Image (spheres, rainbow, N blue to C red):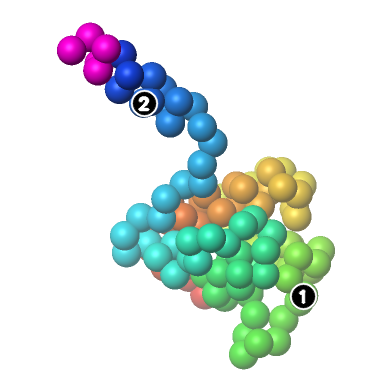
Amino acid sequence: MRRLLAASLATLLATACSPSPPAPLAGSPASGTPGDAALGSPAWYDWVDRSLGISSDGHGPDHGSPEWNQAVQRKLGQEAPQATPGSPQWQQSVDALLRTRGNPPSSG
């Protein structure tokens, strides 16, 4: 019994200490996120673009460009990450924020 408990605890600790992307919440904007979309990938940019309504009818700044990054910052408003727009830390913060939002983003 102790061995089983020790093995279970070791597995739990190893899993808890392993970095993993946040899981989308059911019914959140993240439910439309491709499960395998890596930060900075075309699929990830498409998802952020759709989630925040950056482009209109396919017209807008190029994904990842300074103009696009600033549009994301404006759409996020006070929730916008403080990291340098476009940096890996910024992408991670944007991703986490959009995955945890409970309400669809407002247009504007």
The secondary structure that dominates the magenta segment is helix
In the picture provided, is 17 more to the left or to the right than 74? Answer: left
Residue 78 visible somewhere in the drawing: no
Is residue 102 shown left or right of residue 105? left
Q: Which is more toward the observer, 16 or 26?
A: 16
* Quadrant where the image shows the N terminus: top left
- For mark 2, what is the residue? 12
- Residue drawn where x is 61% and y is 69% of the image: 43
How far across and how far down the image is residue 19, in percent?
54, 36
Residue named by callout 1:
62
Among numbered discs 2 and 1, the one appearing first in the sequence: 2
Q: What secondary structure is found at the residue carrying circle 1?
A: loop
Question: As rendered, which of 6 and 44 lies closer to the eye?
Answer: 6
Q: Is residue 63 left or right of residue 105?
A: right
Amino acid carrying mark 1 in the image: Asp
The magenta-colored residue range is: 1-5
Q: Distance between the residues labelled 2 and 1?
A: 42 Å
Instruction: Point out residue 6 in the picture as x, y percentages from the top left corner.
Output: 31, 13
Q: Nearest the camera: 80 or 50? A: 50
Find residue 71 and report its horizontal and vertical position in percent.
Answer: 69, 67
As drawn, the label of residue 27 is none
- State the residue in front, 47 or 72: 47
Look at the image and say whether residue 84 sits in the magenta stretch.
no
Q: Residue type at mark 2?
A: Leu
